[in-house]
Image (cartoon, coloured by chain):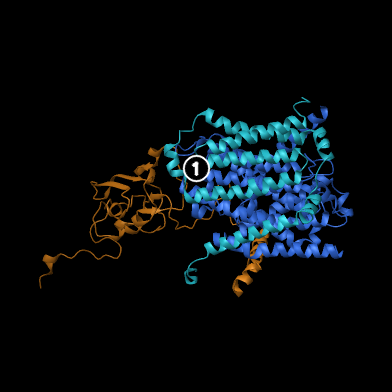
Amino acid sequence: MPEMLWKLLEITIIIALLIPMAAMLVWVERRLIGIWQDRHGPNRVGPFGVLQSFADLLKILGKEDWVPPFSDRLVFTLAPIIGAICVLMSFAVVPFSPDIGVSNLNIGLLFFLAMASLAVYSVVLAGWASNSKYALLGGMRAAAQTVSYEVFMGLSVMGVVLLTGTFNLREIVLAQTDGWLIQSQFVGFFIFLIAGIAESHRLPFDLPEAETELTAGFHTEYSGLKFALFFLGEYLGVTLISAMSVVLFFGGWLMPEPLASWLPPLLWFVIKIMCFVMFFILLRTSLPRPRFDQLLKFGWMVMLPLALLNLLVTALLRLTGVL
Amino acid sequence: MSYFASIESLFYLAATVAVVASLKVVTGNNTVHALLYLVVSLLAVAVCFYLMGAPFAAGLEVIVYAGAILVLFVFAVLMFGLGKDETQHAPQNSGISNMFGAMFLAFALLIELVVIINNAQIQQSLQVKVISSKSVGIMLYGPYLLAVEIASFLLLAGLLAGYHYAKPESQGSQR
Amino acid sequence: MNKNSFKNSLLISQLRTMWLVIKHTFTKADTVQYPEQKPYLAPRYRGRIVLTRDHGGEERCVACNLCAVACPVDCIALQQVVDDDGRKRADFFRINFSRCILCGFCEEACPTYAIQLTPDVELAEYDRQNLVYEKEHLLINGPGKYPDYSFYQQSGIAIAGKGKGEAEQERPPIDVKGLMP
């Protein structure tokens, strides 16, 4: 029984760290975008503006939690919750360090893919339940985009599974002790990264919420706490995709020897994640949004053949014993 | 506690959720709500698979059925705009009691999942008779090769037919 | 799939964009930290409106109403009176800054350089009524942009202490009846 209590404590601590981190990411993102656009970004609330997110949170909590009378009340309320829960559940299988991590599930990678595919419901149902044109269009875009890019995401990580022979994320990390998988799987990593951006519908693939075309897309009708939940889900999703990239291709908490002894493994893991998060923010600032048909065409005409080719070559090299 | 957290009781709970959700699928009068119940039902079936020692099948169930195929169903419903005439005839679903059913089923599954992930004993006893993905692969490409091939041909035929129907009538109209 | 879309799929343009953006990490921000650090506003910046005086300390405004006519949002209201010494001045002069769009048309229309726009933009008030400026709020004790100009020294109007023909660049008036040959 105390074992279970410890586990619950661990889960609570991880969630209690993840959610403020997602809030901080909003500030980090705004600051970085500011710097890259020759501005300062929010720098007033607290030192360097670090408390900006909490000020925003206070404001958003004080807002009226409005449910449109023309919406489907139940689904409208459920949609943001599904999004946040699916992303938080995915963190259960992420191995943070040699001895931190909620669950050592032997289908960890499949669990992550499953949760990522369930997270679509959040957006699609939000779009449907809002009962407005913009939201519906956003929801439909999200459905088509996510179902398409899920395919490539699944295929791109299969190379990793071939090389390590397991779905267990902890074992995948441990299999990279001699060298990170990015060395042999850089094509897979590239596809995973792009599919990850499309899955978490971040810019430049934020077509479900494309402000310039659909006002705010699927969350046009949302306000207050529910809107905050969507935002939380989005930023947790960015962190999750970064964490999965690190775990699958960049050796998780592992580092080459001289560096590894400088900092604890958990810190190395967090540093790697932050590098990826900053990369995602860089993508957001620099790249324009593609048209929707361009997005789908790029997926099916470029990503899918590339992913299949990567899988094929990896399997061949594996069979011939090169890798 | 030990009885609540035993594999059998969890299995029957998940099975009950699956049955109740499936019943709601066929008795409801709102398409999207029915699809949501179907998702819950499939998730419950996935939990059943997991508890029977087939984590690979459970994962695939969620990814393929709940994650991809039903999203396509929802997409089709959104596309054809079936909601219009339903919202007029359907009873107003703003009451807490109406929300309770769906919430309860999904919440039961969530609790179950937390219990499974949280309980080292269950994790250990699940490891004993686990069917690995490797053995699934060997079975698919060994004794069941013919079935796999037939299924893949069926899918290929479906793909070709879909492509044929989706192809524009005149090539010039594109772009 | 033509050649162009193959080239696009290599994402070269995207990578170049990202490189260009990341180079901006090291450029200085253009932002001015406003309340602590004031931005430079040019002397002819169009900000708060003032009524100026000439170097003699007299009001320049002769209340000719041209500014009120030129104003596109009708935010200027005034009334002319003529003093005993012959000077014309505004009985009241009112500018409603909650309407004013700081376009500067009044300044252009003014024949006596009385109304001028200054580089002061800090006009915010909590109460809307405080944005209605009366003549005593508008008048300043200086000549503004044209320090040497004085309307009555240039024009032929007679005032106390200056008769007709005594202005600068003005000849004395000619008695047309004494011009007989």
Disc 1 sits on a residue from what chain? A
Left or right of A70? Residue C58 is left
Q: Nearer the viewer, residue A60 or B27?
A: B27
At 39% across and 52% down in the image, what residue appears?
A: C102
Left or right of A48? Residue C149 is left
Name the residue type under label 1: Ser
Q: Which of C18 and B49 is in front in this view?
A: B49
In this structure image, what is the colour of chain A? blue
At 76% across and 43% down in the image, what residue appears?
A: B54
Q: Which chain is orange?
A: C
Residue highlighted by disc 1? A130
Q: Is mark 1 on a helix, strand or loop?
A: helix
Image-quadrant location for residue A91: top right
Give residue C8's position: percent from left, percent from top: 62, 69
Left or right of C64? Residue B80 is right
In the image, is residue C130 above or below residue A31? Answer: above
Q: Tell me how many marks there are.
A: 1
Name the image quarter holding the N terminus of chain C.
Answer: bottom right
Give residue B38's position: percent from left, percent from top: 60, 41
At 40% across and 58% down in the image, what residue appears?
A: C146
In the image, is residue C151 above or below residue B74? Answer: below
Give residue C81's position: percent from left, percent from top: 24, 46
Residue A163 seen in this snapshot = yes
In the image, is residue B46 above or below residue B92? Answer: below
Residue A51 seen in this snapshot = no
Name the image quarter holding the C terminus of chain C.
Answer: bottom left
In this structure image, what is the colour of chain B? cyan
Q: Which of B47 and B1 is in front in this view?
A: B47
Give residue B33's position: percent from left, percent from top: 54, 39
